[in-house]
Image: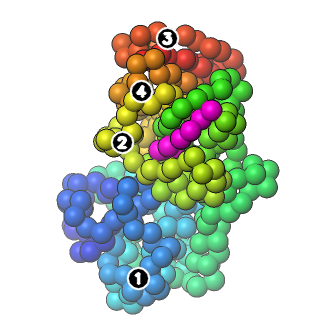
Amino acid sequence: MSALPAFENVYGAPPLELCGDTSRLPQFSPLIPGALDLHDVAPASLGPITMLAPPGTIERRYALALALRALKPDATLTALAPKDKGGTRLAGDMEALGCTFHESSKRHHRICVTQSGGDAKTMAQAIADGAPRFEEELGLWTQPGVFSWNRIDPGSAMLMNHLPDFSGRGADLGAGLGVLAHGVLASPKVTALTLIELDGRAIACAKRNVTDARVQFLQADVRKLNVPDLKALDFIVMNPPFHDGGAEDKSLGQAFIKTAASLLKKGGRLYCVANRHLPYENVLKDNFRRVTMVAEEAGFKIYEAMA
């Protein structure tokens, strides 16, 4: 296939060399702030869409099924994924959804193109499998694809056990489902807490998990945060990510630390948990007046840093 079919909508950030500049097109990925939600699109109403398919099987089939359901009868879905991040399973997903499709490879990506509406029963099942749900064992609303969606992350659990009684205004950077918020809000001296998270699915679940009136929610990329009202905070908590698109990226956590330093008032405190192997000590010391290791156990470290 020399060129991909024309498209009017986009899901995710497909490679520039394959799809060109998609930044001005209507966006449907939950990982991009301001994006539309495929779940809300009326059936058979959407024009051609290209999708950088998610790496996880459940979320990938969920997104594919939503796109197929939304497509106009003559519109095209072009789904692609790197071969090592779901691409080798993409054709199987399309077959499972009952699609007739053309498959090709280009620039280390597998590409599947279809105009078929798929099988209504299997599509409905894929949508149900990937939808938000309340998990009794967690006691939380969650959704496949969200970080640690079916278990409490051990780093977050450890940090919960070492949180002090905070007071004043604070934030949770990379808040996920809102797990840490419950520990923070246990202190009546906390007056306001902003949960900041890139994943729109996690934000939607967190709004159901954390109903305290002191809380506000913000979908944003912590690395590019520019919120004038979110300054001079008394405290920040975080379990920063260290994977981007499935690959380890130590710079993510380092960027979170720098953002935290910029948001805290003088004397404000950061409580941060990280995997033991991650090189955060130097960036903490470069951006904070005092850094103390609060705990080290089970492969994790907890730091308190004073601005």
Q: Disc 3 versus disc 1: distance between alpha carbons? A: 53 Å
Question: Looking at the image, is 279 positioned above or below residue 71?
Answer: above
Q: Disc 1 versus disc 4: distance between alpha carbons? A: 46 Å
Q: Which label sits in the foreground, 1 or 2?
A: 2
Q: Which secondary structure is most common in the magenta stretch?
A: strand
Cβ atoms under marks 1 and 2 closer than 8 Å: no
Q: Quadrant of the N terminus?
A: bottom left
Question: Looking at the image, is 204 positioned above or below residue 217?
Answer: below
Q: Disc 3 versus disc 4: distance between alpha carbons? A: 14 Å
Q: Quadrant of residue 58?
A: bottom right
The residue segment tinted magenta is: 189-196
Label of residue 264 in the image? 4
Around disc 1, counting alpha carbons within 10 Å, would you say few (fewer than 14), some (14 to 19), or many (20 or more)? many
Percent position (x, y) of residue 106? 30, 57
Relative to 209, 56 lies left or right:
left
Cβ atoms under marks 3 and 1 closer than 8 Å: no
Viewer-proximal residue, 7 or 107? 7
